[in-house]
Image: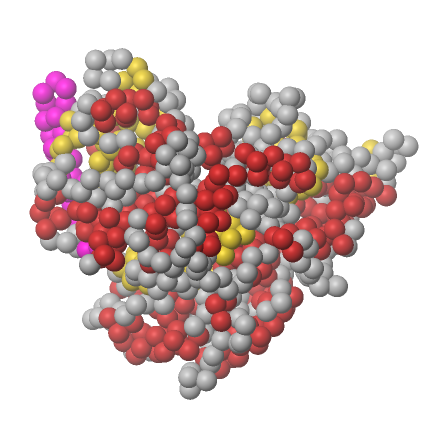
């Protein structure tokens, strides 16, 4: 009987509605004749709006995965400051008095890392005051928790406060899957998707396939959870997880801490996975208790024991299985410029020479949302203490970013910060800082090619210090910390020693750390903690000045004109084109709430296939322009445009500006060899038409300036999309030659309505008003 399962008192908004979820799951199981289900399927099916409609007549889950579209009711939403601005500006256009599900806002991305927490925080608050005030007033008005600047990084705070086994949540950040480390299904989305959940509109997701990762053996010595995911990224590549949820299982899971599992799920984003998750473990129970949620821990454990809700069924089928033996797993170093270029530490010296990478390392950075747990920090300190005892000093600058005030205060109490600082480390604010281009390296910042080692999750060009030539190698905090003492790519701390001044040889012993603090966590500064159950205050005025260059109220995009699309090819993009190429971060982050200003960065990182130039496109008369400048020119001339690109276009993040800006600047469609999932959805939400070549070879036939016209778009829209099909494009070359290029679309019935209305927000707003 599920009726007796009620959320513990005082924890209502933080407990998944287990009774309802179990009922939904029972219905879905009945529809599927009690087939064994994976964990991910159980959580997704239990959040279906209409479980009785689950792919009626499809018979088997194999016929659902990768084919059907789900309509889901997520339990909560988290938003980081950079993306929350646009999410909330869009939410405001719907005219609702409060959000339909609990939400939280986290001020983390806009804080620069430079000299240390105190001064950095002060100057970042001053620079971003207008935006933080806007977010805070939205929080008060609509009853959304506001975690102010300095309180911590979104994913760490979610793990400490909101993630629970069986929960389903959305977050406006691509590393939202971090919460899967605590057994949730947590998916990174754009602001428009977050608005679905915030308005109580069913959120649509193409049924993912399920990739099982079986962990055998157990971690020991230098190997850490980070190495599981960096190794997996090397095996699967940045596209290997596209369309999949990654579900971990096997004996090896038992040797992982909850925060270690979060690191692994966090970086599932680097292989393009929809999300990643772990079955409920004792480590989850321990972590929930340690983070002041004992009643939720007890309830979740009972629900799992009695209903097996947070564990895969015996005999559940995966679409693909990868096995990793933790007994033989070696630390990896991934990079530069892509997270899937994985080199085992034992081969790093050799690979460095082969690739002619610089041998000197210029900085080490640990922490971020990926690796700032108590375990990570205590292991790093254990390495630092060994070096200190031997009289060694770091050879290069070293930075530590705690993930939250709770972590910072706890490691301060336990003397870890003292060890870091005594050994020359700079402890930055509890914020993203160097992980998102908010790293000021000062007057001596290297301008040329240089190597940094980080325990972050992403290493695209210019991601950390804005320098396209900074080579970021991703690895565990243990390896980063050891490497700062040699500053040399040829050093393998597992096997080699460092010569001391007295001539002795010093060799590191494997790191040792604690999963959780022996004396429990402490909260730290109270001012960083919002009310847990905020009540909306409708009288609060949300101010947006018309003169602001940081914030701008949104004008709805125009609705579809009822005609076939007629576009001109503005740019043919070559090679990798991530959301960082399409909508650069760093200094541009400050315009996230101002669509017109931020659109001046559109595709400035993209390489022109026809000329090899970056941020260069050519008008029809041959005049060269920066890419956004030409887009603005064509917008003003009423010349709708299309961009053509290669594989995994939009890889990397949930950044919806990568869809909003092209739409704002007059783009109608993007045609590529393949899309990253979140970006394709974001384009649809903003009323753009994402298409993929039916035959990749057609990419070679197209040139900038070609006219591309759809011939059966009206027909497709009238039929309601059908979740996929062919859109034919008539190409007219500037020579007058014409030919047809068949392209694939994946538009669902709802997405067709978004396109017709001009955007998802236009459509939802209309529904809410009707
Ligand atoms: Fe922030 Fe970097 Fe994580 S930007 S949310 S610390 S991936």
Name the residue at 28% across, 25% down: 632
Magenta stretch containing residue 728, yes or no? Answer: yes
Name the residue at 80% across, 35% down: 393
Quadrant containing the N terminus is bottom left
- Image coordinates for residue 629, horizontal then vertical, percent: 32, 22
Q: Is 694 situated above or below 49?
A: above
Can residue 207 be seen here? The reply is no
Q: Is 720 situated above or below 734?
A: below
Tell me the quarter of the picture where residue 434 sits: top right
Q: Which portion, as a residue range, is magenta? A: 725-750
Quadrant containing the C terminus is bottom left
Name the residue at 30% across, 15% down: 624
Tell me the quarter of the picture where residue 41 sits: bottom left
- Image coordinates for residue 282, horizontal then vertical, percent: 60, 70
Question: Between residues 199 and 243, which one lies in front from this camera angle?
Answer: 199
Q: How many marks?
A: 0
Name the residue at 80% across, 40% down: 422
Q: Name the outermost residue toward the bottom.
A: 1
Question: Between residues 583 and 311, which one lies in front from this camera angle?
Answer: 583
- Image coordinates for residue 6, horizontal then vertical, percent: 47, 79
Q: Main secondary structure of the magenta part?
A: strand
Q: Is residue 18 left or right of residue 691?
A: right
Q: Is residue 454 left or right of residue 419?
A: left
Q: Name the outermost residue toward the right.
A: 502
Magenta stretch containing residue 602, yes or no? Answer: no
């Amino acid at each position: 009987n599920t009726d007796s399962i009620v959320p513990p008192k005082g924890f209502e908004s933080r407990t998944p509605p287990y009774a309802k979820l179990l009922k939904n799951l029972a219905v879905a199981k009945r529809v599927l004749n009690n087939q064994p289900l994976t964990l991910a399927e159980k959580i997704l099916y239990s959040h279906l709006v209409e479980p009785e409609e689950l792919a009626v007549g499809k018979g088997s889950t194999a016929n659902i995965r990768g084919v059907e579209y789900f309509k889901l009711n997520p339990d909560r939403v988290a938003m980081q400051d950079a993306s929350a601005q646009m999410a909330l500006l869009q939410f405001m256009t719907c005219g609702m008095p409060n959000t339909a599900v609990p939400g939280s806002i986290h001020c983390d991305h806009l804080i620069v890392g430079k000299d240390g927490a105190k001064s950095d925080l002060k100057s970042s608050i001053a620079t971003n005051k207008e935006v933080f005030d806007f977010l805070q007033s939205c929080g008060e008005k609509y009853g959304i928790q506001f975690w102010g600047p300095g309180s911590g990084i979104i994913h760490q705070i979610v793990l400490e406060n909101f993630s629970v086994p069986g929960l389903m949540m959305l977050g406006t950040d691509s590393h939202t899957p971090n919460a899967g480390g605590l057994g949730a299904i947590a998916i990174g989305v754009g602001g428009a998707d977050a608005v679905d959940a915030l308005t109580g509109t069913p959120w649509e997701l193409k049924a993912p396939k399920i990739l099982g990762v079986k962990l055998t053996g157990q971690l020991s010595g230098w190997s850490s959870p980070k190495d599981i995911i960096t190794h997996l990224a090397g095996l699967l590549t940045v596209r290997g997880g596209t369309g999949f949820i990654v579900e971990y299982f096997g004996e090896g899971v038992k040797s992982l801490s909850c925060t270690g599992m979060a690191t692994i799920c966090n970086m599932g984003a680097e292989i393009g996975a929809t999300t990643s998750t772990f079955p409920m473990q004792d480590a989850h129970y321990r972590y929930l208790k340690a983070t002041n949620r004992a009643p939720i821990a007890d309830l979740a454990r009972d629900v799992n024991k009695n209903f097996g809700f947070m564990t895969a069924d015996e005999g559940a089928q995966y679409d693909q299985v990868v096995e990793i033996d933790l007994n033989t797993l070696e630390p990896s170093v991934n990079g530069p410029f892509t997270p899937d270029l994985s080199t085992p530490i034992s081969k790093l010296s050799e690979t460095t020479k082969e690739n002619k990478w610089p041998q000197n390392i210029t900085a080490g950075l640990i922490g971020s949302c990926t690796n700032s747990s108590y375990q990570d920090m205590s292991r790093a300190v254990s390495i630092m203490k060994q070096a200190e005892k031997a009289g060694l000093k770091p050879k290069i600058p070293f930075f530590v970013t705690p993930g939250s005030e709770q972590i910072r205060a706890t490691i301060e109490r336990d003397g870890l910060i003292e060890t870091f600082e005594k050994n020359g480390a700079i402890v930055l604010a509890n914020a993203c800082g160097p992980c998102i281009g908010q790293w000021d390296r000062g007057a001596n910042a290297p301008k040329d090619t240089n190597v940094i080692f980080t325990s972050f999750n992403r290493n695209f060009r210019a991601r950390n210090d804005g320098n396209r030539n900074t080579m970021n190698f991703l690895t565990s905090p243990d390896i980063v910390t050891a490497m700062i003492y040699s500053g040399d790519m040829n050093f393998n701390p597992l096997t080699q020693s460092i010569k001391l001044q007295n001539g002795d040889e010093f060799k590191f012993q494997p790191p040792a750390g604690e999963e959780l603090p022996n004396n429990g966590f402490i909260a730290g500064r109270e001012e960083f903690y919002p009310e847990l159950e905020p009540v909306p205050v409708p009288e609060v005025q949300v101010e947006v000045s018309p003169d602001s260059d940081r914030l701008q109220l949104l004008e709805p995009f125009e609705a579809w004109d009822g005609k076939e699309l007629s576009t001109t090819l503005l740019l043919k993009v070559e090679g990798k084109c991530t959301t960082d190429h399409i909508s650069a971060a760093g200094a541009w982050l400050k315009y996230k709430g101002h669509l017109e200003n931020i659109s001046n960065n559109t595709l400035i990182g993209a390489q022109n296939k026809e000329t090899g130039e970056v941020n260069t496109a050519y008008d029809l008369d041959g005049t060269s322009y920066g890419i956004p400048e030409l887009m603005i020119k064509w917008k003003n001339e009423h010349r709708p445009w299309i961009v053509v690109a290669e594989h995994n276009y939009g890889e990397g993040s949930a950044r919806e500006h990568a869809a909003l800006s092209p739409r704002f600047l007059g783009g109608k469609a993007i045609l590529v060899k393949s899309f990253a999932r979140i970006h394709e959805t974001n384009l649809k939400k903003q009323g753009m038409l994402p298409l993929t070549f039916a035959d990749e070879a057609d990419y070679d036939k197209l040139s900038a300036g070609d006219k591309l016209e759809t011939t059966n778009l009206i027909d497709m829209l009238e039929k309601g999309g059908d979740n996929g099909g062919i859109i034919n494009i008539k190409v007219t070359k500037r020579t007058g030659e014409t030919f047809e290029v068949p392209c694939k679309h994946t538009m669902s019935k709802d997405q067709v309505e978004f396109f017709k209305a001009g955007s998802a927000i236009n459509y939802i707003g209309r529904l809410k008003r009707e």
